[in-house]
Image (cartoon, helix red, strand yellow):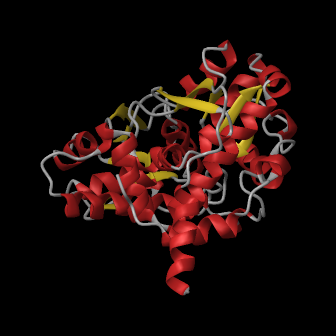
Amino acid sequence: MRKLALVSAVLLLCAPAAAVAQTTKLRVAICARTISMGVGSPFAVATKMGWFRQEGLDIEIVPLPGSTDCVKAVGTGEVPIALPSVEPLANGRPQGVKAKIYYTAYQTNAYGIAVPADSPIQSPGELRGKSIGVTSLASAGVVVARAQVAAAGLDPARDVQIVVAGEGAQTAAMVRNKQVDALSQFDTQYAMVENAGVKMRYLDRRDIEKFPGNGFLASEETLRTRRKELVGVARAYAKGTIFTIANPEAAVRIVYEVFPQTRPTGKDEATAVREDMRVLEARMPHYKLEPAGVKRWGESSEANYAAYVDFLVKWGVITRKVPTGDLITNELIDEINRMDPARIAAEAAAYRYRP
């Protein structure tokens, strides 16, 4: 009987979506040049399981260099939805970017300055005259680096040099060859650097770790006119997130299937899966709700966003305090959460990957 129940659960999770007469093509921008395991997993799982199609959606992922580009793309209407961090929005809002984050995907901040494990540098205050590598100059890593060195008493414009170090293996090579002294990147990038053989160590990041990370951003007009599609994207993504936490190994294999370009070359399957599980496990704590003090998937903590804006203003990263209500909205969260998270997690845990 128990075996039958398990089989039924797996069949239910894998069942094709209800027939949808027509799907809407929707472009969603991610704020990195490539689709990586940490960013791609909820999207890939939701695609594989038919959850986007259940919502009447056909999703196209649009990689952009960083969060600044994502905010600009939403502001100009190039894409209806993007997944940036909030700093460029806080800068852009006073300049006329009328958009809001309506679903917080990473409830805590994945960024922070890190150095090689054997580096003598122990705090951001010791970075005077040093170079800090970011994934791109449009990345939120630039903002975080400036804020952290400013908080340590340095002048980010004169005392440090921020340079592009790329992603993954390229970043690891620059660190290994001492072309940069430190990095201002994020959880999954650091995991990929370590997979390439360079062990990293975060400097003190207690001042930023509880601040919110990336979330789904849409213009105010899109929020008014395309509510159903925005809810559908976020609900399918939330299901993909729940699945990823419950069964990261299956999630890795699904990402390889849906986004074949993510499959590593020159490694056997077991090694590739093991290393990419390490990448996912670096991201998973930031998906979780409890550290942010929220209870619903995608819910934005007004207190946490307000504290982050205060931090950015205090250290001169943004010049004007922006009201939290101009940056975030929870108006879609109840509708997004019309699902059974416990059931999704249980069925995901029982799932066995099949191509």
Front residue of 130/72: it is: 72
**Residue positioned most to the left:** 266
Front residue of 335/62: it is: 335
- Residue appearing at x 53%, y 63% in the figure: 11
- Left or right: 291 in relation to 223: left
Give x and y (percent) for residue 351.
47, 66
Give x and y (percent) for residue 221.
81, 20
- Left or right: 74 in relation to 160: right
- Relative to 244, is 170 above or below? above
Give x and y (percent) for residue 156.
50, 37
- Residue appearing at x 80%, y 31% in the figure: 227
Tally of numbered tags: 0
- Left or right: 142 in relation to 109: left
**Residue positioned most to the bottom:** 1
The answer to whether residue 279 shows anywhere in this view is: yes
- Relative to 95, is 129 above or below? below
Give x and y (percent) for residue 127.
40, 49
- Relative to 9, is 155 above or below? above
The answer to whether residue 205 shows anywhere in this view is: no
- Residue appearing at x 54%, y 86% in the figure: 2
| Quadrant of the image containing the N terminus | bottom right
Q: Quadrant of residue 5?
A: bottom right
